[in-house]
């Protein structure tokens, strides 16, 4: 992962600390309806204040496509920020250094949506330079925006002494413990709908983990590649060569691939559809695979029992439709139980994973759940995250 500086490493006394945060929260009728992201970033802002710094908060909000748009003004987040910090927050549309310097030493300043100009997403050096002129130190606490090289996430980080905020630090440490310098054996569980959206992810994982369990719709493509008939199942028949290539790469890297060995099939994609459990060579042309069967779950539970580290992305079946949530729920609960006993480090995230683990009532037991979406997936793909790279050195 390389080293990155943290707030602990920085002298912030009397300094203006430009702080990139993610407060892209849901809003209805001018009210924040879920302040989780704001509550999570509050400790970083309070830590900066505690160290004598003046936080100037930078954030994006929605997708204004480079144009000012009153419906996507960050002003709406001020009351929730003030509640989380128990402090007044000063909102500014057009910040300048004189105004920031004139504010009291313990002021918290929130700057309008960084994406109100196209220069942000273009990582325009002029915008990065302007942002840098506003502060003395840069702190990035927005892991979820770190896969984008934007002026407020990457450009400015290269112009000022930079560090990770508390949330970013926790996320990077958890990710490093899972794939960077993990306690082996490492098991990866990857499910979800399609192989096509996760080719890079699967290729990276087979080179890093000791075993890879593949489930969900994407397992059907691997089963088809092994010659099984998958009936009406979701299956990308054009990707069977890719599936075979991933299996070959896994073998060369010493990574065991665990595919379903029994499956739950139905004739329609619907909750409570009539269904049966069968072997891999018993799926009829009229049936579709909607979940992994009990033998598969038992094998997975055994793999979980010997693993020291787990990385999980995607459900093992059509978990939104009862009873096709069973494999996902049982495997998630088995993993959660081992985490709770301190026997497993489990990191999960991306796409529907958080919803699936919440559905299984296991999310709270996992070591770390990333809510970062795209940034988490790019990390699983092994890609450098520009916002993180800029903090190193
Ligand atoms: P993803 O966003 O790629 O993680 O995919 C999640 C979606 O995959 C969920 O909506 C699941 O219902 C769906 N899914 C998982 N397994 C299957 C399956 N066997 N057949 C159809 N859809 C599935």
Image: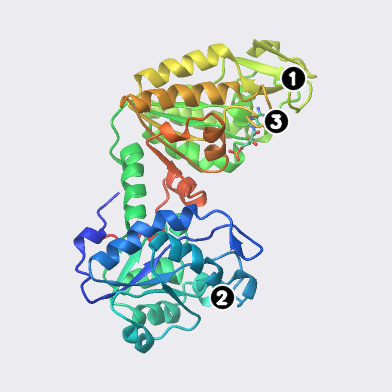
Residue marked by disc 2: 116
User: Image quarter for residue 286?
Assistant: top right
Q: CA distance from mark 2 to mark 3?
A: 41 Å
| Coordinates of residue 280 in the picture (x, y in percent) | 64, 13
Circles 2 and 3, Cβ within 8 Å, touching? The answer is: no
Left or right placement of residue 143 versus residue 297 in this view:
left
Whether 66 is drawn above or below 228: the answer is below
Give the image's coloring scheme: rainbow
Query: Tag 1's secondary structure?
Result: strand
Number of other residues with Cα within 10 Å of mark 1, as a class: few under 14, some 14 to 19, many 20 or more: many
Depth check, mark 3 against mark 1: the one in front is 1
Number of other residues with Cα within 10 Å of mark 3, as a class: few under 14, some 14 to 19, many 20 or more: some
Query: Tag 3's secondary structure?
Result: loop
Residue at 20% in and 72% down: 13
In terms of sequence position, does the residue under pointer 2 or pointer 1 come before the other?
2
Residue 144 at least partly seen: yes
Whether 186 is drawn above or below 34: the answer is above
Residue marked by disc 1: 266
Mark count = 3
Residue marked by disc 3: 234
Ligand 1 near label 3 (Cβ, under 8 Å)?
A: yes
In terms of sequence position, does the residue under pointer 2 or pointer 3 come before the other?
2
User: Image quarter for residue 164?
Assistant: bottom left
Residue at 42% in and 27% down: 336
Q: Which quadrant of the render holds ligand 1?
A: top right
Q: Nearer the viewer, residue 115 or 80?
A: 80
Q: Nearer the viewer, residue 36 or 164?
A: 36
Residue at 42% in and 66% down: 153
In terms of sequence position, does the residue under pointer 3 or pointer 1 come before the other?
3
Circles 2 and 1, Cβ within 8 Å, touching? The answer is: no
């Amino acid at each position: 992962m390389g080293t990155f500086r943290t707030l602990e490493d920085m002298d912030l006394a009397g300094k203006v600390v430009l702080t990139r945060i993610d407060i892209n929260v849901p809003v209805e009728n001018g009210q924040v309806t879920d302040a989780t992201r704001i509550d999570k970033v509050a400790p970083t802002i309070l830590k900066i204040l505690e160290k004598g710094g003046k936080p100037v908060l930078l954030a994006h909000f929605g997708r204004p496509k480079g144009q000012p748009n009153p419906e996507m003004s960050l002003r709406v987040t001020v009351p929730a920020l003030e509640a989380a910090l128990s402090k007044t927050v000063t909102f500014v549309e057009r910040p300048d250094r004189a105004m920031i310097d004139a504010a009291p030493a313990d002021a918290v300043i929130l700057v309008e949506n960084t994406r109100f100009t196209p220069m942000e997403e273009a990582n325009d050096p002029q915008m990065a330079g302007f942002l840098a002129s506003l502060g003395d130190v840069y702190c990035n606490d927005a892991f979820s925006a770190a896969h984008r090289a934007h002026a407020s996430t990457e450009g400015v980080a290269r112009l000022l002494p930079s560090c990770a905020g508390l949330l970013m630090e926790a996320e990077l440490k958890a990710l490093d413990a899972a794939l960077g310098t993990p306690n082996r054996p490492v098991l990866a569980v990857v499910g979800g709908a399609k192989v096509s959206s996760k080719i890079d992810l699967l290729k990276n994982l087979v080179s890093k983990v000791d075993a890879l369990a593949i489930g969900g719709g994407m397992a059907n493509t691997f089963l088809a590649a092994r010659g099984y008939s998958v009936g009406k199942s979701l299956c990308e028949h054009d990707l069977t060569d890719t599936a075979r290539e991933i299996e070959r790469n896994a073998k060369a890297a010493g990574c065991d691939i665990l595919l379903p060995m029994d499956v739950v099939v139905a004739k329609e994609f619907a909750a409570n559809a009539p269904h049966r459990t069968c072997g891999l060579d018993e799926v009829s042309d009229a049936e579709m695979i909607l979940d992994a069967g009990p033998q598969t779950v038992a094998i997975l539970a055994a793999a979980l029992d010997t693993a020291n580290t787990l990385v999980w992305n995607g459900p093992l079946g059509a978990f939104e439709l009862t009873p096709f949530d069973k494999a996902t729920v049982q495997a998630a609960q088995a993993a959660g139980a081992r985490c709770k006993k301190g026997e497993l480090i489990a990191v999960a995230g991306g796409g529907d994973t958080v919803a699936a683990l919440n559905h299984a009532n296991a999310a709270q037991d996992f070591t770390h759940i990333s809510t970062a979406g795209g940034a988490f997936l790019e990390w699983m793909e092994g890609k450098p995250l520009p916002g993180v790279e800029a903090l190193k050195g």
